[in-house]
Image (cartoon, grey):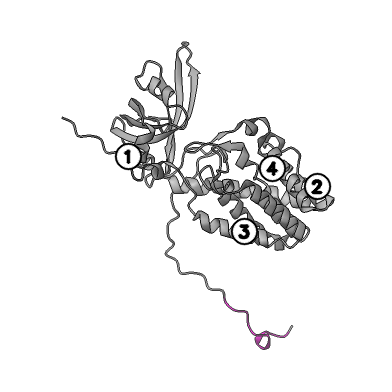
């Protein structure tokens, strides 16, 4: 009698070299499930499975035993997979032999949910405390109160929300991490750009993505809510900020400029912006947002990369795979700057 397969994580599967045909078993979340039709008219499923360490996709045809089980599980379902390792265009794409849908009572096993749900690498409580400090740093009273009003309305939901479905910071506490990282960058860069109003820029950074708390829903997987589909986080964030500004009696000029930051922060209309950035603060926030979104993709790819791989899978947000192999440690001694000669030692001109 064959021994039961030891459960493998996504990272462990991706770390396997020359693993074609090797049997495996995993407990994973069904993150995405799309029904498609082949050229011969037969339906098939394009699926994505994941855990806290990564994800992979594969194709399941209608004549395969797992087909109906996956349709029953649906997006957000937890499944136990058995199959064999395979690859498609250099990516892990296993061939599935068996899928069992786990019932709710099965999810109480110690550590199971913790292993399935990806979370921000930084401590969420520490991030939240730091974000409160950034709010307190806003010197303009009504602007600071406006920001406070938004976060009070959102409550704890902001702390848990992801920042995206897939592109960047797409995990629990991801929105908190993204916003706090942007606030750090904002604080560091503001001294270089004196044309930018510091209070307005910080307020814009803190509020720019607050609409995502309403746009996204789900526990084990993230999907767009009804309001998210019908309005989107840019409009939802604008509504939150406008309501909070009226409550705080923020002056009309700052209210309009704060609203503009939120409406334009996506950068381009095809990326979701309502308008192009047209104030110094809006341009600044939009670029800081783009910087942290892309570096968030880089950081996540580096965390999830297998030691045996030189490159990550292709990252849609970067339009390229990422080189993940670490730079070798230099054997050269550090360069020490030579101090300038004292004024008395310099030759006369």
Query: CB under 8 Å between callouts 4 and 2?
Result: no
Residue 237, numbered circle: 4
Quadrant showing the N terminus: top left
Residue mark closest to the camera, 1 vs 2: 2
Give the CA distance from mark 4 to mark 3: 19 Å
Residue 49, numbered circle: none
The answer to which of 48 and 212 lies nearer the viewer is 212
Q: Position of residue 9 (x, y in %)?
A: 36, 40
Looking at the image, residue 251 sits to the left or right of residue 335; the answer is right
Q: Position of residue 315 (x, y in %)?
A: 52, 39
* Sequence-wise first label, 4 or 2: 4
Query: CB under 8 Å between callouts 4 and 3?
Result: no
* Sequence-wise first label, 2 or 3: 3
Residue positioned 58% across, 33% down in the render: 224
Circle 2 Cα neighbour tier, 10 Å, few/some/many (<14 / 14–19 / ≥20): few
Query: CB under 8 Å between callouts 1 and 2?
Result: no
Q: Secondary structure at mark 4?
A: helix
The answer to which of 336 and 231 lies nearer the viewer is 231
Residue positioned 34% across, 28% down in the render: 100
Q: Position of residue 319 (x, y in %)?
A: 56, 38
Residue 8, numbered circle: 1
Give the CA distance from mark 2 to mark 3: 24 Å
Q: Which residues are magenta?
A: 338-348
Q: Secondary structure at mark 1?
A: loop
Residue positioned 56% across, 51% down in the render: 177
Q: Which residue is mark 2?
A: 256
Residue mark closest to the camera, 1 vs 3: 3
* Sequence-wise first label, 4 or 1: 1
Give the CA distance from mark 1 to mark 3: 39 Å
């Amino acid at each position: 009698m064959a021994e039961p397969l030891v459960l493998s994580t996504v990272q462990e599967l991706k770390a396997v070299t020359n693993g074609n045909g090797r049997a495996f078993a995993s407990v994973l979340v069904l993150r995405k499930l799309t029904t498609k039709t082949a050229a011969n008219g037969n339906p098939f499923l394009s699926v994505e499975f994941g855990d806290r360490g990564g994800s992979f996709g594969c194709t399941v045809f209608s004549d395969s035993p797992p087909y109906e089980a996956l349709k029953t599980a649906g997006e957000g379902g937890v499944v136990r997979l058995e199959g064999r390792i395979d690859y498609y265009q250099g990516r892990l794409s296993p061939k599935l032999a068996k899928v069992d849908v786990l019932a709710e009572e099965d999810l109480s096993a110690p550590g199971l949910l913790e292993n399935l749900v990806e979370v921000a690498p930084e401590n969420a409580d520490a991030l939240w405390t730091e974000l409160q400090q950034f709010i307190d740093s806003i010197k303009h009273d009504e602007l600071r109160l406006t920001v406070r009003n938004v976060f009070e309305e959102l409550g704890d939901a902001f702390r848990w929300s992801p920042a995206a479905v897939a592109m960047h910071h797409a995990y629990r506490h991801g929105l908190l991490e993204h916003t706090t990282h942007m606030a750090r960058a904002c604080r560091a860069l503001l001294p270089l750009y004196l044309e930018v109003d510091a209070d307005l820029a910080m307020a814009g950074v803190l509020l720019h993505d607050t609409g995502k708390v309403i746009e996204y829903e789900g526990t084990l997987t993230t999907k767009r809510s009804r309001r998210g589909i019908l309005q989107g986080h840019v409009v939802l964030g604008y509504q939150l900020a406008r309501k909070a500004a009226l409550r705080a009696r923020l002056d009309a000029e700052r209210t309009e400029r704060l609203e503009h930051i939120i409406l334009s922060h996506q950068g381009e209309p095809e990326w979701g912006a309502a308008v192009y950035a047209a104030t110094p603060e809006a341009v600044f926030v939009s670029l800081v947002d783009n910087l942290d979104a892309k570096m968030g993709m880089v950081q996540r790819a580096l965390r999830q990369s297998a030691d045996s791989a030189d490159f990550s899978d292709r990252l849609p947000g970067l339009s390229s795979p990422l080189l993940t192999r670490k730079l070798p440690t230099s054997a050269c001694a550090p360069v020490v700057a030579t101090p300038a000669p004292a004024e008395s030692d310099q030759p006369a001109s």
